[in-house]
Image: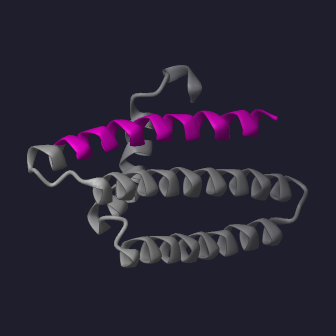
Amino acid sequence: MDGKKEVWGQTVRLLVGECVCLAVMFLVYFLLGRLDSRVLLGGILGTVLATANFFIMAANATVAAEKAVQQDVKGGAMLMRTSYIIRLIIMFVILFAAVKSGYCDAIASIVPIALSRWILTLGEFFGKKGDA
């Protein structure tokens, strides 16, 4: 049960960080005079994909850890490997379709995904000392 709370907590922290970065990205596009609906939709899509990707990865890691505790280490490792491949394929297909359709800006779609690792790292760095 504690693992599920941790997954939700980390996901919420990531989402907050993504929203802050999204607002900064929109501000930069606005200052450059390039803010339009494609940038807005692309940024929102990238933020949703980055957050969903992390949530699914963290939830699968919790399940894999439970499998490892039950002495099914190979099953947990296989779950993580297949989850990674499937998540990457799904994100690529969604991003490719969105950008190819002309409804989303490519850079605005990719930036939130690229920043998610940095956001998580900063969240851990500035997180509560008692969480360790």
Instruction: In the rendered view, tell whether residue 45 sits above or below residue 74.
Output: above
Image-quadrant location for residue 121? top left
Dominant secondary structure, magenta: helix
Residue at 51% over, 58% down: 49
Residue 72 sits inside the magenta stretch: no
- Of 33 and 82, which appears nearest the observer? 33
Q: Position of residue 96 (x, y in %)?
A: 43, 77
| Residue found at the very far right of the displayed protein | 70
Residue at 80% over, 72% down: 74
Q: Which residues are magenta?
A: 1-27
- Of 95 and 74, which appears nearest the observer? 95
Q: Position of residue 1 (x, y in %)?
A: 82, 35
Residue at 72% over, 57% down: 60
Q: Is residue 21 left or right of residue 72?
A: left
How many discs mark residues in the rendered view? Answer: 0
Residue 9 sits inside the magenta stretch: yes
Q: Is residue 31 left or right of residue 91?
A: left
